[in-house]
Image (tube, rainbow, N blue to C red):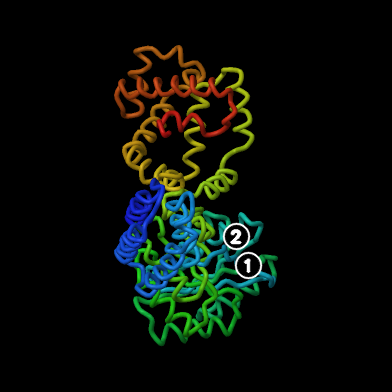
Amino acid sequence: MFDALSERLTAVLSALRGRGTLSEGDVSSALREIRIALLEADVHYRVVKELMATIGERAVGSEVFESLTPGQQVVKIVRDALAEAMGGQRTTLTLDRRPSVILLVGLQGSGKTTSAAKLAVALAKDGRKPLLAACDLRRPAAIEQLETLGTSLDVPVVSRVDPTPEGIASGAVATAKETLRDVVIVDTAGRLQVDEQLMKELGRIVDAVEPDEKLLVVDAMTGQEAVAVASTFDERIGLTGLLLAKLDGDARGGAALSIRHVSGKPILYVGTGEKADRLEPFHPERMADRILGMGDVLSLIEEAEQRLDEEKAEGLAERIRKDRFTLQDFLEQLEEMQKLGPLSQIIDRLPGAAKLKGRAGDADEDEMNRALAILRSMTLQERRDPSIIGGRRKKRIARGSGTKVRDVNRVLSRFQDAKRALKMVGGRRGKGRSPDEWLNVP
Protein backbone atom coordinates (compact mmCIF):
# COMPACT_ATOMS: atom_id res chain seq x y z
CA MET A 1 0.00 0.00 0.00
CA PHE A 2 1.42 3.39 -1.09
CA ASP A 3 4.84 1.73 -1.53
CA ALA A 4 6.17 4.16 -4.13
CA LEU A 5 5.05 7.31 -2.28
CA SER A 6 6.17 5.96 1.08
CA GLU A 7 9.66 5.14 -0.17
CA ARG A 8 10.12 8.59 -1.70
CA LEU A 9 8.87 10.53 1.32
CA THR A 10 10.75 8.34 3.79
CA ALA A 11 14.00 8.92 1.89
CA VAL A 12 13.50 12.68 1.79
CA LEU A 13 12.62 13.02 5.46
CA SER A 14 15.28 10.57 6.65
CA ALA A 15 17.91 12.90 5.21
CA LEU A 16 16.55 15.70 7.46
CA ARG A 17 16.18 13.63 10.62
CA GLY A 18 19.86 13.15 11.25
CA ARG A 19 20.84 16.83 11.01
CA GLY A 20 21.44 18.98 14.06
CA THR A 21 20.64 22.20 12.18
CA LEU A 22 18.64 23.02 9.07
CA SER A 23 18.93 25.94 6.72
CA GLU A 24 16.14 27.41 4.64
CA GLY A 25 17.86 25.83 1.64
CA ASP A 26 17.66 22.38 3.24
CA VAL A 27 13.97 22.77 3.91
CA SER A 28 13.24 24.20 0.44
CA SER A 29 15.07 21.31 -1.22
CA ALA A 30 13.11 18.77 0.85
CA LEU A 31 9.81 20.48 0.05
CA ARG A 32 10.60 20.39 -3.65
CA GLU A 33 11.22 16.62 -3.45
CA ILE A 34 8.01 16.11 -1.47
CA ARG A 35 6.04 18.05 -4.09
CA ILE A 36 7.45 15.87 -6.89
CA ALA A 37 6.69 12.70 -4.92
CA LEU A 38 3.05 13.73 -4.39
CA LEU A 39 2.53 14.61 -8.05
CA GLU A 40 4.07 11.31 -9.16
CA ALA A 41 1.69 9.55 -6.75
CA ASP A 42 -1.21 11.02 -8.78
CA VAL A 43 -2.33 13.29 -5.96
CA HIS A 44 -4.67 16.01 -7.28
CA TYR A 45 -2.73 19.14 -8.22
CA ARG A 46 -4.99 21.32 -6.05
CA VAL A 47 -4.29 19.13 -3.02
CA VAL A 48 -0.55 19.22 -3.70
CA LYS A 49 -0.62 23.00 -3.97
CA GLU A 50 -2.47 23.44 -0.66
CA LEU A 51 -0.37 20.80 1.09
CA MET A 52 2.87 22.45 0.06
CA ALA A 53 1.61 25.86 1.14
CA THR A 54 0.69 24.47 4.57
CA ILE A 55 3.91 22.51 5.04
CA GLY A 56 6.07 25.37 3.73
CA GLU A 57 4.48 27.94 6.04
CA ARG A 58 5.00 25.75 9.12
CA ALA A 59 8.42 24.34 8.18
CA VAL A 60 10.17 27.65 7.55
CA GLY A 61 9.09 29.16 10.89
CA SER A 62 11.29 29.85 13.89
CA GLU A 63 9.76 26.85 15.71
CA VAL A 64 11.69 24.53 13.39
CA PHE A 65 15.00 26.38 13.13
CA GLU A 66 15.21 26.99 16.88
CA SER A 67 14.29 23.41 17.75
CA LEU A 68 16.88 20.99 19.16
CA THR A 69 15.59 18.41 16.63
CA PRO A 70 14.61 20.43 13.54
CA GLY A 71 14.49 17.35 11.30
CA GLN A 72 11.95 15.67 13.54
CA GLN A 73 9.89 18.85 13.62
CA VAL A 74 9.66 18.87 9.82
CA VAL A 75 8.61 15.21 9.83
CA LYS A 76 5.83 16.01 12.30
CA ILE A 77 4.68 18.95 10.19
CA VAL A 78 4.48 16.77 7.05
CA ARG A 79 2.70 14.03 8.97
CA ASP A 80 0.10 16.44 10.42
CA ALA A 81 -0.50 18.05 7.01
CA LEU A 82 -1.10 14.67 5.35
CA ALA A 83 -3.49 13.66 8.13
CA GLU A 84 -5.43 16.92 7.79
CA ALA A 85 -5.70 16.46 4.01
CA MET A 86 -7.30 13.05 4.60
CA GLY A 87 -9.77 14.37 7.17
CA GLY A 88 -7.84 14.76 10.41
CA GLN A 89 -10.01 12.59 12.65
CA ARG A 90 -11.84 9.29 12.22
CA THR A 91 -15.44 9.72 11.04
CA THR A 92 -18.05 7.10 11.93
CA LEU A 93 -21.39 6.14 10.43
CA THR A 94 -24.58 7.77 11.73
CA LEU A 95 -26.94 4.89 12.41
CA ASP A 96 -29.48 6.20 14.91
CA ARG A 97 -32.62 4.94 13.19
CA ARG A 98 -33.94 1.35 13.48
CA PRO A 99 -33.44 0.10 10.88
CA SER A 100 -30.85 2.46 9.48
CA VAL A 101 -30.26 2.36 5.73
CA ILE A 102 -26.86 2.56 4.03
CA LEU A 103 -26.95 3.14 0.28
CA LEU A 104 -23.83 2.06 -1.65
CA VAL A 105 -23.32 3.70 -5.04
CA GLY A 106 -20.50 3.79 -7.57
CA LEU A 107 -19.36 2.93 -11.06
CA GLN A 108 -19.41 -0.58 -12.47
CA GLY A 109 -16.33 -2.51 -11.40
CA SER A 110 -15.62 -0.36 -8.33
CA GLY A 111 -16.34 -3.26 -5.98
CA LYS A 112 -19.77 -2.29 -4.62
CA THR A 113 -21.17 -5.80 -4.19
CA THR A 114 -18.08 -7.16 -2.45
CA SER A 115 -17.88 -4.00 -0.34
CA ALA A 116 -21.52 -4.43 0.70
CA ALA A 117 -20.70 -7.87 2.09
CA LYS A 118 -17.51 -6.59 3.77
CA LEU A 119 -19.45 -3.73 5.37
CA ALA A 120 -22.00 -6.22 6.71
CA VAL A 121 -19.17 -8.18 8.35
CA ALA A 122 -17.64 -5.02 9.83
CA LEU A 123 -20.97 -3.88 11.27
CA ALA A 124 -21.70 -7.34 12.67
CA LYS A 125 -18.39 -7.16 14.57
CA ASP A 126 -19.66 -3.93 16.13
CA GLY A 127 -22.77 -5.70 17.40
CA ARG A 128 -25.12 -4.73 14.57
CA LYS A 129 -27.51 -7.06 12.76
CA PRO A 130 -27.15 -6.20 9.07
CA LEU A 131 -29.35 -7.19 6.14
CA LEU A 132 -28.35 -6.90 2.47
CA ALA A 133 -30.60 -5.65 -0.35
CA ALA A 134 -29.68 -6.78 -3.87
CA CYS A 135 -30.83 -3.87 -6.04
CA ASP A 136 -28.42 -4.29 -8.95
CA LEU A 137 -30.77 -5.60 -11.64
CA ARG A 138 -28.52 -4.74 -14.57
CA ARG A 139 -25.24 -6.57 -14.09
CA PRO A 140 -25.56 -10.29 -14.89
CA ALA A 141 -25.20 -12.48 -11.79
CA ALA A 142 -24.99 -9.49 -9.42
CA ILE A 143 -27.90 -10.77 -7.34
CA GLU A 144 -26.50 -14.32 -7.29
CA GLN A 145 -23.11 -12.96 -6.18
CA LEU A 146 -24.61 -11.08 -3.24
CA GLU A 147 -26.82 -14.04 -2.28
CA THR A 148 -23.79 -16.34 -2.27
CA LEU A 149 -21.80 -13.91 -0.15
CA GLY A 150 -24.71 -13.46 2.25
CA THR A 151 -25.13 -17.22 2.69
CA SER A 152 -21.42 -17.74 3.38
CA LEU A 153 -21.40 -14.90 5.93
CA ASP A 154 -24.75 -15.78 7.52
CA VAL A 155 -26.22 -12.40 6.54
CA PRO A 156 -29.77 -12.40 5.07
CA VAL A 157 -30.22 -11.02 1.56
CA VAL A 158 -33.46 -9.59 0.18
CA SER A 159 -33.85 -9.87 -3.61
CA ARG A 160 -36.42 -10.49 -6.33
CA VAL A 161 -39.31 -9.25 -4.16
CA ASP A 162 -40.12 -6.58 -6.75
CA PRO A 163 -39.20 -5.92 -10.41
CA THR A 164 -37.73 -2.49 -9.56
CA PRO A 165 -34.64 -1.53 -7.52
CA GLU A 166 -36.64 0.88 -5.34
CA GLY A 167 -39.22 -1.86 -4.68
CA ILE A 168 -36.51 -4.29 -3.55
CA ALA A 169 -34.98 -1.62 -1.29
CA SER A 170 -38.39 -0.89 0.28
CA GLY A 171 -39.01 -4.60 0.71
CA ALA A 172 -35.64 -4.98 2.44
CA VAL A 173 -36.49 -2.24 4.94
CA ALA A 174 -39.86 -3.90 5.67
CA THR A 175 -38.13 -7.28 6.15
CA ALA A 176 -35.57 -5.70 8.48
CA LYS A 177 -38.37 -4.33 10.67
CA GLU A 178 -40.12 -7.71 10.79
CA THR A 179 -36.93 -9.67 11.60
CA LEU A 180 -35.44 -7.06 13.97
CA ARG A 181 -32.45 -6.31 11.73
CA ASP A 182 -31.07 -2.86 12.56
CA VAL A 183 -29.09 -1.99 9.41
CA VAL A 184 -30.04 -2.39 5.73
CA ILE A 185 -27.16 -2.20 3.22
CA VAL A 186 -28.43 -1.47 -0.27
CA ASP A 187 -26.25 -2.63 -3.19
CA THR A 188 -27.09 -0.66 -6.34
CA ALA A 189 -26.32 -0.89 -10.03
CA GLY A 190 -23.35 0.88 -11.61
CA ARG A 191 -22.36 2.05 -15.05
CA LEU A 192 -19.06 2.40 -16.85
CA GLN A 193 -19.61 6.14 -16.52
CA VAL A 194 -22.07 8.44 -14.79
CA ASP A 195 -25.24 8.90 -16.87
CA GLU A 196 -28.73 10.31 -16.46
CA GLN A 197 -30.46 6.91 -16.36
CA LEU A 198 -28.27 5.76 -13.45
CA MET A 199 -28.90 8.92 -11.48
CA LYS A 200 -32.66 8.72 -11.95
CA GLU A 201 -32.62 5.11 -10.70
CA LEU A 202 -30.58 6.09 -7.64
CA GLY A 203 -32.92 9.03 -7.05
CA ARG A 204 -35.94 6.70 -6.95
CA ILE A 205 -34.19 4.46 -4.39
CA VAL A 206 -33.30 7.48 -2.25
CA ASP A 207 -36.92 8.67 -2.34
CA ALA A 208 -38.19 5.20 -1.45
CA VAL A 209 -36.01 4.42 1.60
CA GLU A 210 -34.51 7.80 2.64
CA PRO A 211 -31.04 6.38 3.45
CA ASP A 212 -29.18 7.54 6.57
CA GLU A 213 -25.85 7.16 4.78
CA LYS A 214 -25.07 7.43 1.07
CA LEU A 215 -21.58 6.03 0.53
CA LEU A 216 -19.67 6.15 -2.72
CA VAL A 217 -17.52 3.07 -3.36
CA VAL A 218 -14.48 4.03 -5.41
CA ASP A 219 -11.58 1.97 -6.69
CA ALA A 220 -8.49 3.44 -5.00
CA MET A 221 -6.34 2.50 -7.98
CA THR A 222 -8.18 4.95 -10.28
CA GLY A 223 -6.26 7.87 -8.73
CA GLN A 224 -7.48 11.36 -9.59
CA GLU A 225 -10.40 9.94 -11.59
CA ALA A 226 -11.95 8.94 -8.25
CA VAL A 227 -12.11 12.62 -7.29
CA ALA A 228 -14.13 13.52 -10.40
CA VAL A 229 -16.51 10.58 -9.83
CA ALA A 230 -17.08 11.62 -6.21
CA SER A 231 -17.86 15.21 -7.20
CA THR A 232 -20.44 14.09 -9.79
CA PHE A 233 -22.26 11.68 -7.47
CA ASP A 234 -22.28 14.25 -4.68
CA GLU A 235 -23.87 16.87 -6.93
CA ARG A 236 -26.66 14.51 -7.95
CA ILE A 237 -27.60 12.54 -4.81
CA GLY A 238 -25.67 14.21 -1.94
CA LEU A 239 -23.06 11.79 -0.59
CA THR A 240 -22.38 11.44 3.12
CA GLY A 241 -19.12 9.51 2.89
CA LEU A 242 -16.68 7.41 0.91
CA LEU A 243 -15.47 3.82 0.90
CA LEU A 244 -12.14 3.19 -0.83
CA ALA A 245 -11.98 -0.31 -2.28
CA LYS A 246 -8.78 -2.15 -3.29
CA LEU A 247 -6.52 0.14 -1.27
CA ASP A 248 -4.08 -2.76 -0.80
CA GLY A 249 -3.33 -2.65 -4.53
CA ASP A 250 -2.74 1.11 -4.63
CA ALA A 251 1.02 1.71 -4.68
CA ARG A 252 0.66 5.45 -5.31
CA GLY A 253 -1.98 6.80 -2.92
CA GLY A 254 -3.44 9.54 -5.13
CA ALA A 255 -7.09 8.75 -4.39
CA ALA A 256 -6.71 8.46 -0.61
CA LEU A 257 -4.80 11.74 -0.37
CA SER A 258 -7.01 13.68 -2.79
CA ILE A 259 -10.61 12.59 -2.54
CA ARG A 260 -11.39 13.81 1.00
CA HIS A 261 -9.72 17.17 0.48
CA VAL A 262 -11.42 17.90 -2.85
CA SER A 263 -14.86 16.37 -2.27
CA GLY A 264 -15.20 17.39 1.38
CA LYS A 265 -16.66 13.95 2.15
CA PRO A 266 -15.02 11.75 4.81
CA ILE A 267 -13.45 8.40 4.02
CA LEU A 268 -15.18 5.95 6.37
CA TYR A 269 -13.75 2.58 5.34
CA VAL A 270 -10.98 1.16 3.19
CA GLY A 271 -10.80 -2.28 1.59
CA THR A 272 -7.43 -3.94 2.25
CA GLY A 273 -7.85 -7.39 0.71
CA GLU A 274 -10.17 -9.77 -1.10
CA LYS A 275 -11.55 -11.63 1.93
CA ALA A 276 -14.83 -10.54 3.49
CA ASP A 277 -13.15 -9.41 6.71
CA ARG A 278 -10.69 -7.11 4.93
CA LEU A 279 -12.50 -3.81 5.47
CA GLU A 280 -10.92 -1.38 7.93
CA PRO A 281 -12.17 1.84 9.53
CA PHE A 282 -10.21 4.74 8.05
CA HIS A 283 -7.99 6.65 10.48
CA PRO A 284 -6.33 9.65 8.75
CA GLU A 285 -3.57 10.02 11.34
CA ARG A 286 -2.67 6.34 11.24
CA MET A 287 -2.67 6.38 7.44
CA ALA A 288 -0.33 9.37 7.45
CA ASP A 289 2.01 7.42 9.74
CA ARG A 290 2.00 4.50 7.32
CA ILE A 291 2.73 6.73 4.35
CA LEU A 292 5.77 8.14 6.17
CA GLY A 293 7.06 4.69 7.14
CA MET A 294 6.11 5.06 10.81
CA GLY A 295 3.81 2.05 10.74
CA ASP A 296 0.34 1.59 12.20
CA VAL A 297 0.89 -0.51 15.26
CA LEU A 298 -2.41 0.56 16.86
CA SER A 299 -4.47 -0.95 14.04
CA LEU A 300 -2.34 -4.10 14.11
CA ILE A 301 -2.94 -4.48 17.86
CA GLU A 302 -6.69 -3.90 17.45
CA GLU A 303 -6.87 -6.51 14.70
CA ALA A 304 -4.83 -8.97 16.75
CA GLU A 305 -7.20 -8.52 19.70
CA GLN A 306 -10.16 -9.28 17.44
CA ARG A 307 -8.68 -12.22 15.55
CA LEU A 308 -6.29 -14.02 17.85
CA ASP A 309 -7.45 -16.52 20.42
CA GLU A 310 -6.70 -15.11 23.87
CA GLU A 311 -7.26 -18.46 25.60
CA LYS A 312 -4.75 -20.15 23.29
CA ALA A 313 -2.25 -17.36 23.92
CA GLU A 314 -2.51 -17.78 27.69
CA GLY A 315 -2.05 -21.54 27.38
CA LEU A 316 0.97 -21.01 25.15
CA ALA A 317 2.54 -18.59 27.63
CA GLU A 318 2.12 -21.17 30.40
CA ARG A 319 3.78 -23.91 28.31
CA ILE A 320 6.64 -21.59 27.42
CA ARG A 321 7.23 -20.82 31.10
CA LYS A 322 7.40 -24.57 31.77
CA ASP A 323 9.65 -25.16 28.72
CA ARG A 324 6.99 -27.29 26.99
CA PHE A 325 6.88 -25.43 23.66
CA THR A 326 6.32 -28.04 20.90
CA LEU A 327 5.99 -28.18 17.13
CA GLN A 328 2.22 -28.29 17.68
CA ASP A 329 2.48 -24.90 19.42
CA PHE A 330 4.71 -23.69 16.60
CA LEU A 331 2.10 -24.71 14.01
CA GLU A 332 -0.74 -23.07 15.95
CA GLN A 333 1.20 -19.82 16.28
CA LEU A 334 1.90 -19.68 12.54
CA GLU A 335 -1.79 -20.34 11.86
CA GLU A 336 -2.77 -17.59 14.32
CA MET A 337 -0.39 -15.21 12.58
CA GLN A 338 -2.06 -15.98 9.24
CA LYS A 339 -5.34 -14.68 10.66
CA LEU A 340 -3.84 -11.19 10.53
CA GLY A 341 -3.52 -11.47 6.76
CA PRO A 342 -0.59 -11.85 4.36
CA LEU A 343 2.85 -11.21 5.81
CA SER A 344 3.29 -8.21 3.52
CA GLN A 345 0.23 -6.51 5.10
CA ILE A 346 1.53 -7.13 8.62
CA ILE A 347 4.92 -5.69 7.71
CA ASP A 348 3.23 -2.71 6.06
CA ARG A 349 1.95 -1.65 9.50
CA LEU A 350 5.29 -1.87 11.26
CA PRO A 351 7.66 1.11 11.65
CA GLY A 352 10.35 1.01 8.98
CA ALA A 353 8.16 -1.13 6.73
CA ALA A 354 10.12 -0.22 3.58
CA LYS A 355 13.32 -1.69 5.05
CA LEU A 356 11.57 -4.75 6.45
CA LYS A 357 9.97 -5.53 3.08
CA GLY A 358 13.41 -5.92 1.59
CA ARG A 359 14.11 -8.70 4.07
CA ALA A 360 10.69 -10.28 4.45
CA GLY A 361 8.86 -10.14 1.15
CA ASP A 362 7.39 -12.77 -1.15
CA ALA A 363 10.24 -15.20 -0.42
CA ASP A 364 9.36 -15.29 3.28
CA GLU A 365 5.65 -15.60 2.47
CA ASP A 366 6.52 -18.70 0.42
CA GLU A 367 8.74 -20.02 3.20
CA MET A 368 5.95 -19.65 5.74
CA ASN A 369 3.51 -21.55 3.48
CA ARG A 370 6.13 -24.25 2.96
CA ALA A 371 6.68 -24.53 6.73
CA LEU A 372 2.93 -24.84 7.34
CA ALA A 373 2.72 -27.65 4.76
CA ILE A 374 5.61 -29.48 6.44
CA LEU A 375 4.16 -29.11 9.94
CA ARG A 376 0.74 -30.28 8.79
CA SER A 377 2.32 -33.36 7.16
CA MET A 378 3.63 -34.50 10.54
CA THR A 379 1.61 -36.71 12.83
CA LEU A 380 0.32 -35.23 16.09
CA GLN A 381 2.80 -37.47 17.94
CA GLU A 382 5.69 -36.04 15.91
CA ARG A 383 4.61 -32.47 16.56
CA ARG A 384 4.32 -33.11 20.27
CA ASP A 385 7.66 -34.95 20.48
CA PRO A 386 10.04 -33.75 17.72
CA SER A 387 12.83 -35.96 19.09
CA ILE A 388 11.30 -39.01 17.35
CA ILE A 389 11.66 -37.44 13.89
CA GLY A 390 14.51 -39.37 12.26
CA GLY A 391 15.64 -39.83 8.67
CA ARG A 392 12.76 -42.07 7.53
CA ARG A 393 10.15 -39.81 9.07
CA LYS A 394 11.73 -36.75 7.46
CA LYS A 395 11.51 -38.40 4.03
CA ARG A 396 7.83 -39.23 4.62
CA ILE A 397 7.08 -35.67 5.81
CA ALA A 398 8.90 -34.21 2.78
CA ARG A 399 6.89 -36.40 0.37
CA GLY A 400 3.63 -35.54 2.09
CA SER A 401 4.28 -31.79 1.94
CA GLY A 402 5.76 -31.71 -1.56
CA THR A 403 9.11 -30.46 -0.26
CA LYS A 404 12.62 -31.79 0.27
CA VAL A 405 14.28 -33.22 3.37
CA ARG A 406 16.47 -30.11 3.64
CA ASP A 407 13.27 -28.02 3.94
CA VAL A 408 12.10 -30.25 6.80
CA ASN A 409 15.50 -29.82 8.49
CA ARG A 410 15.24 -26.05 8.07
CA VAL A 411 11.83 -25.94 9.80
CA LEU A 412 13.11 -28.10 12.65
CA SER A 413 16.11 -25.79 13.01
CA ARG A 414 13.88 -22.70 13.03
CA PHE A 415 11.73 -24.34 15.66
CA GLN A 416 14.73 -24.93 17.92
CA ASP A 417 15.84 -21.29 17.44
CA ALA A 418 12.35 -20.09 18.36
CA LYS A 419 12.20 -22.38 21.39
CA ARG A 420 15.52 -21.04 22.71
CA ALA A 421 14.43 -17.44 22.14
CA LEU A 422 11.09 -18.00 23.89
CA LYS A 423 12.79 -19.68 26.81
CA MET A 424 14.98 -16.59 27.24
CA VAL A 425 12.01 -14.24 27.52
CA GLY A 426 10.13 -16.65 29.77
CA GLY A 427 6.85 -16.25 27.93
CA ARG A 428 6.58 -12.54 28.67
CA ARG A 429 6.07 -11.70 25.02
CA GLY A 430 3.04 -13.99 24.81
CA LYS A 431 1.47 -14.76 21.50
CA GLY A 432 3.12 -14.28 18.16
CA ARG A 433 6.76 -14.34 19.27
CA SER A 434 7.76 -17.64 17.71
CA PRO A 435 6.77 -16.67 14.13
CA ASP A 436 8.80 -13.46 14.51
CA GLU A 437 11.83 -15.47 15.54
CA TRP A 438 11.22 -17.91 12.71
CA LEU A 439 11.09 -15.08 10.20
CA ASN A 440 14.17 -13.36 11.67
CA VAL A 441 12.35 -10.02 11.68
CA PRO A 442 14.17 -7.56 14.01
Q: For numbered disc 1, what is the local secondary structure?
A: strand
- Residues at marks 1 and 2 touching, judged by CB atoms closer than 8 Å: yes
Q: For numbered disc 2, what is the local secondary structure?
A: helix
Say whether residue 313 is left or right of residue 228: right
Residue 136 in percent (x, y) is at 46, 73
Q: Residues within 10 Å of mark 1 (few under 14, many from 20)?
A: many
Residue 220 in percent (x, y) is at 39, 64
Which of the two labelled residues, at mark 1 and mark 2, occupies the earlier sequence position? 2
Q: Residues within 10 Å of mark 2 (few under 14, many from 20)?
A: few
Q: Residue at x 52, y 70 (%)?
A: 266
Q: Which residue is mark 1?
A: 183
Residue 234 in percent (x, y) is at 48, 80
Residue 400 appears anywhere in the view: yes
Q: Residue at x 60, y 65 (%)?
A: 92
168 or 110: nearer the viewer? 110
Q: Residue at x 50, y 66 (%)?
A: 84
Q: Nearer the viewer, mark 1 or mark 2?
A: 2
In the displayed structure, would residue 179 be above or below residue 239?
above
In the displayed structure, would residue 322 be above or below residue 60?
above
Three-letter residue code for mark 1: Val
In the displayed structure, would residue 377 be above or below residue 21?
above
220 or 35: nearer the viewer? 35
Q: Which residue is mark 2?
A: 123
Three-letter residue code for mark 2: Leu
Name the quadrant containing residue 154.
bottom right
For the residues labelled 1 and 2, the Cα–Cα distance comes to 9 Å
